[in-house]
Image: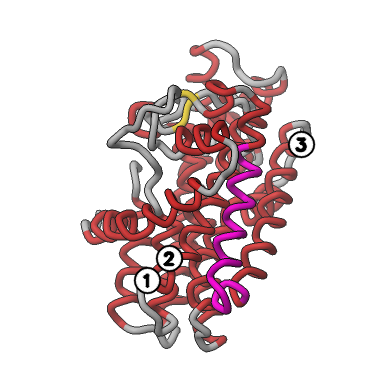
């Protein structure tokens, strides 16, 4: 795994964190500031500051590199980076409620600590302030705001599809991939191109970055799907086999169900009664998904999408050092924890 990407993420965090903290500080309600700060890993449930925590900053890194790819500076990308990170965390707060996920980043999720209502409102507040950050950045923000707003609509549509698929007795693989394109790939495509929009990059640069981000997003989600079945809770920060326990129809699970092999039939019978409730049933389901080839299929697809992402970079008029960092980041994202 490349060591350049973690260094990049650390550098971007130090650049974007002050702007992110300043944005949260503008929230008028103290409860909203506390829920947002807790979710972002800045404090404990009582508001006491923490020195560690927070996400990987992948989306802010893409936005900062996007501005540099378009001929601007890293600082030019900070408002866009702040906005996409706020939108991302708005979606996480809401998704955790809808999915009833009780753990994220190795501690209880926002709704578990503060209740559904407060977590929903904090998510709404983060979305609003993300938009405000771009509006306040002047002409650059006006150029990039349509991209962000369109992406929010796609995120909402993707999450709606995700919920609808959980209630379906039969799901096709192309339906799952379409859902994941909205739920995950749309925001990475936006993150990878919004900085370039802000600095008025050439259309071919913006388009190449968006295509890179979309392919990376699909690869990212497929890896996340694998980790949702096999991931170690101590590494992922979520419950072990969280997607199986939640009854998700993620891509590897649907690929296994559609494999046409005996293990697929046994898996279908096991899941027909609803999400597995015992640890034994969860383990059995995980083994059947693997035996039916669902995990191998997802790994191959993730690698194929990564290759697509890198190809979009190779064909774009982007400064070589920036393209190299974008490529390193893509490899890091896809190779993580698997």
Q: Which span of residues is magenta-colored?
A: 122-142
Q: Would residue 57 be found to the left or right of residue 89 on screen? A: left
- 129 drawn magenta: yes
* SS class, disc 3: loop
Q: CA distance from mark 2 to mark 3?
A: 43 Å
* Residue 203 position by quadrant: bottom right
Q: CA distance from mark 3 to mark 1?
A: 48 Å
Residue hosting label 2: 78
Closer to the camera: disc 3 or disc 1?
1
How crowded is the residue under tag 3: few (<14 C-alpha within 10 Å), some, or many (20+)? Answer: few
* SS class, disc 1: helix
Residue hosting label 1: 75
Quick one: 117 or 109, which is closer to the camera?
Answer: 117
Closer to the camera: disc 2 or disc 3?
2
Mark 3 or 1 closer to N-term? Answer: 1
Residue hosting label 3: 170
Question: Image point 67% across, 31% down: which residue?
Answer: 98
Mark 2 or 3 closer to N-term? Answer: 2
Task: Kindly tell me whether residue 18 is visible in this rendering.
Answer: yes
Q: Would residue 202 be found to the left or right of residue 1 on screen? A: right
Do callouts 2 and 1 mark residues in contact (Cβ within 8 Å)? yes
User: From the image, which quarter does the N terminus lie in?
Assistant: bottom left
């Amino acid at each position: 795994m490349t060591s350049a990407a973690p260094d990049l993420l650390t550098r971007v965090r130090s650049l974007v964190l002050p702007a992110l903290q300043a944005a949260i500080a503008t929230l008028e309600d103290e409860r909203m500031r506390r829920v947002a700060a807790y979710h972002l890993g800045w404090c404990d449930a009582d508001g006491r500051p923490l020195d560690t925590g927070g996400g990987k900053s992948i989306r802010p890194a893409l936005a900062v590199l996007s501005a540099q790819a378009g001929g601007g500076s890293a600082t030019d990308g900070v408002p866009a980076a702040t906005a996409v990170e706020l939108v991302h965390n708005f979606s996480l707060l809401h998704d955790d409620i809808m999915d009833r996920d009780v753990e994220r980043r190795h501690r209880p999720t926002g709704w578990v600590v503060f209740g559904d209502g407060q977590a929903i409102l904090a998510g709404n507040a983060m979305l609003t302030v993300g938009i405000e950050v771009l509006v306040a950045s002047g002409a650059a923000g006006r150029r990039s705001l349509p991209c962000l707003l369109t992406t929010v609509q796609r995120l909402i549509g993707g999450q709606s599809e995700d919920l609808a698929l959980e209630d379906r007795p039969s799901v096709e693989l192309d339906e799952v991939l379409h859902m994941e394109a909205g739920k995950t790939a749309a925001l990475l495509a936006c993150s990878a191109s919004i900085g370039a929009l802000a600095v008025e990059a050439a259309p071919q640069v913006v388009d190449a970055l968006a295509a890179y981000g979309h392919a990376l997003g699909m690869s990212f989600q497929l890896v996340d799907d694998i980790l949702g079945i096999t991931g170690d809770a101590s590494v992922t920060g979520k419950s072990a086999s969280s997607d199986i326990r939640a009854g998700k129809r993620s891509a590897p699970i649907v690929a296994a169900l559609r494999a046409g092999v005996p293990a697929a039939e046994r898996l279908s019978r096991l899941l027909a009664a609803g999400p597995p409730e015992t640890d034994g049933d969860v383990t059995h389901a995980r083994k059947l998904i693997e035996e039916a080839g669902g995990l191998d299929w997802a790994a191959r697809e993730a690698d194929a999408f990564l290759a697509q992402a890198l190809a979009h970079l190779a064909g774009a008029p982007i400064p070589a050092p920036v393209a190299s960092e974008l490529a390193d980041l893509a490899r890091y994202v896809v190779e993580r924890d698997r």
